[in-house]
């Protein structure tokens, strides 16, 4: 049976921890895995742009002896043909596919017809690769997952979906501190699951939310593709006024000893200030680097190499 990475729903807690531990092992001893994917090919399909997703997957495949093909949605026949037909062709040529798509429904169509593993590189509902890298980073810095407390600031979205699921599955108490939830990211099945764990909480007051947190996490308030779009100007201004009390800054965090995380790219002066990014509590760039190591572990796991 083909294994895919769609959300984190399909992974048991022990599988999540196994992938994280393997990623830490790979990071410590990359030479051991330098030829494990010799003559293997990864297709990277981007409907949405990315820096970290492209760099981490392409470098990961290269460092493990394989080859990565970058496919821009706009310059392939995906733009004019049906997904089921294009993925049938691609999956006959490669060993694994990473797809970063706008709609989860299109990802599920791809998975239905692919004959090789498909990795969700991000869609409007889930960002599982990011969440796994986040949890890896937390374990590296704090030595454990179970029993920790993480507070997420910003807007509830695909990132908070995957992170809340990963946290509650591995024993981390997750608190959502947001003024709004992005409607396109709503996943009621996921919400029902995390609420049943007893580890999921919501808190509207930012000052209460930072108390006793071991990790404080934020994300962009505005989708990357819309940040510079003039048609989004009014909504952007509305969000900035609404979300500014949730900015990570020295005033909010002055009494906190929590580690600071952000999945990047960052809008400095919006969801986070420069002094917080550069503070000794920030592990943002370790978090970003770990995308490379977790992508290696994800691909090896799905391909049955670890």
Image (cartoon, helix red, strand yellow):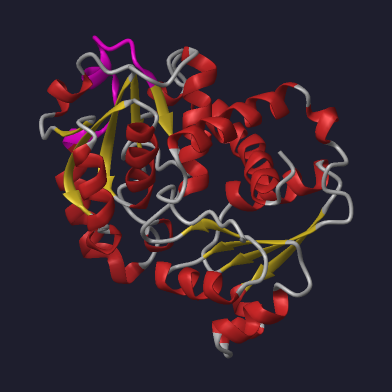
As rendered, which of 94 and 247 lies closer to the eye?
94
As rendered, which of 205 and 81 lies closer to the eye?
81
Q: Residue at x 32, y 33 (%)?
A: 168
Q: Residue at x 29, y 34 (%)?
A: 152
Question: Which region is colored magenta?
Answer: 245-259
Q: Residue at x 64, y 43 (%)?
A: 295
Question: Quick check: 228 above or below 271?
Answer: below
Question: Quick check: 117 above or below 132?
Answer: below
Q: Is residue 157 left or right of residue 14?
A: left
Q: Is residue 267 left or right of residue 129?
A: left
Q: Is residue 249 left or right of residue 1?
A: left
Q: Residue at x 60, y 78 (%)?
A: 74
In this orientation, does residue 291 appear?
A: yes
As rendered, which of 42 and 219 lies closer to the eye?
42
Q: Quadrant location of residue 175?
A: top left
Question: Which quarter of the rendered picture does the N terminus lie within?
Answer: bottom right
Q: Residue furthest front?
A: 1
Q: Quadrant location of residue 232?
A: bottom left
Question: Which quarter of the rendered picture does the C terminus lie within?
Answer: top right
Q: Quadrant location of residue 177?
A: top left
Q: Give residue 123's position: percent from left, percent from top.
A: 44, 61
Is residue 224 one of those drawn in magenta?
no
As rendered, which of 47 and 188 lies closer to the eye?
188
Q: Give residue 233's position: percent from left, percent from top.
A: 27, 63
């Amino acid at each position: 049976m083909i294994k895919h990475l769609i959300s984190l729903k399909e992974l048991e807690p022990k599988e999540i921890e196994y992938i994280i531990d393997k990623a830490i092992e790979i990071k410590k001893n990359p030479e051991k895995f330098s030829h494990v994917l010799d003559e293997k090919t990864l297709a990277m399909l981007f409907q949405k742009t990315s820096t970290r997703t492209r760099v981490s997957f392409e470098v990961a495949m290269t460092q493990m002896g394989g080859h990565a093909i970058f496919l821009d949605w706009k310059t392939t026949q995906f733009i004019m043909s049906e997904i089921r037909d294009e993925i049938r062709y691609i999956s006959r040529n490669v060993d694994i596919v990473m797809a970063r798509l706008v709609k989860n429904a299109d990802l599920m169509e791809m998975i239905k017809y692919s004959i090789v593993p498909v990795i969700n590189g991000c869609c409007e509902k889930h960002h599982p690769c990011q969440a796994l890298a986040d949890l890896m980073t937390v374990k590296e810095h704090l030595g454990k997952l179970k029993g920790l407390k993480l507070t997420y600031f910003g807007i509830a979205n695909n990132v908070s979906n995957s992170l809340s699921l990963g946290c509650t599955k591995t024993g981390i108490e997750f608190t959502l501190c947001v003024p709004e939830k992005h409607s396109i990211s709503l996943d009621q099945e996921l919400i029902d699951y995390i609420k049943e764990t007893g580890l999921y909480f919501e808190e509207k007051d930012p000052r209460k939310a930072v108390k006793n947190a071991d990790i404080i996490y934020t994300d962009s308030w505005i989708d990357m593709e819309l940040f510079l779009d003039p048609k989004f100007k009014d909504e952007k201004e509305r969000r900035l006024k609404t979300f500014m009390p949730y900015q990570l800054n020295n005033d909010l965090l002055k009494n906190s000893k929590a580690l600071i995380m952000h999945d990047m790219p960052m809008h400095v002066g919006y969801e986070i200030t420069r002094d917080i990014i550069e503070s000794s509590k920030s592990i943002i760039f370790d978090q970003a680097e770990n995308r490379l190591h977790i992508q290696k572990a994800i691909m090896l796991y799905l391909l049955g190499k670890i």
